[in-house]
Amino acid sequence: CECNGHSAKCRFSMEVFQQSGRRSGGVCQKCRHHTAGRHCQYCQSGYARDHTKPPTHRKACQRESGRGSQVRVAEWSDVM
């Protein structure tokens, strides 16, 4: 799996494998560091991507300040 260093657990998904053109079926599990998504490529709700850090950094997602709990999940443009 390509989990950007935020997970050590992965599972195979035949559906994801077929959707990827039979290239990758890995789905990360138990993303850490306030990340989420198939590749731990999103920040959880209430967290935003800190673009001063690489996506693999454990503090790539920082708590939003001065905003409500409904925060848009932003995808990292440099990750699948």
Image (spheres, rainbow, N blue to C red):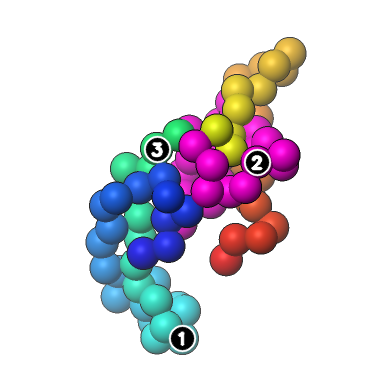
User: Which mark is on residue 32?
Assistant: 3
Q: Residue at x 43, y 62 (%)?
A: 2
Q: Examine the rendered structure and indicate whether residue 72 appears above or below residue 11.
A: above
In the rendered image, which quarter is residue 1 located in?
bottom left
The stretch of residues the image draws in magenta is: 34-58
Amino acid type indicated by mark 3: Arg
Q: Residue at x 29, y 50 (%)?
A: 8
Q: At numbered mark 3, what does the secondary structure look like: helix, strand or loop? A: loop
Q: Which residue is mark 2?
A: 53
Q: At numbered mark 2, what does the secondary structure look like: helix, strand or loop? A: loop
| Residue 80 appears left or right of 17 | right
Report if residue 54 lies within the magenta region. yes
Dot 1 crowding, Cα within 10 Å, few <14, some 14–19, many 20+: few
Q: Examine the rendered structure and indicate whether residue 42 appears above or below residue 62.
A: below
Q: Which residue is mark 1?
A: 21
Q: Position of residue 29 (x, y in %)?
A: 31, 49
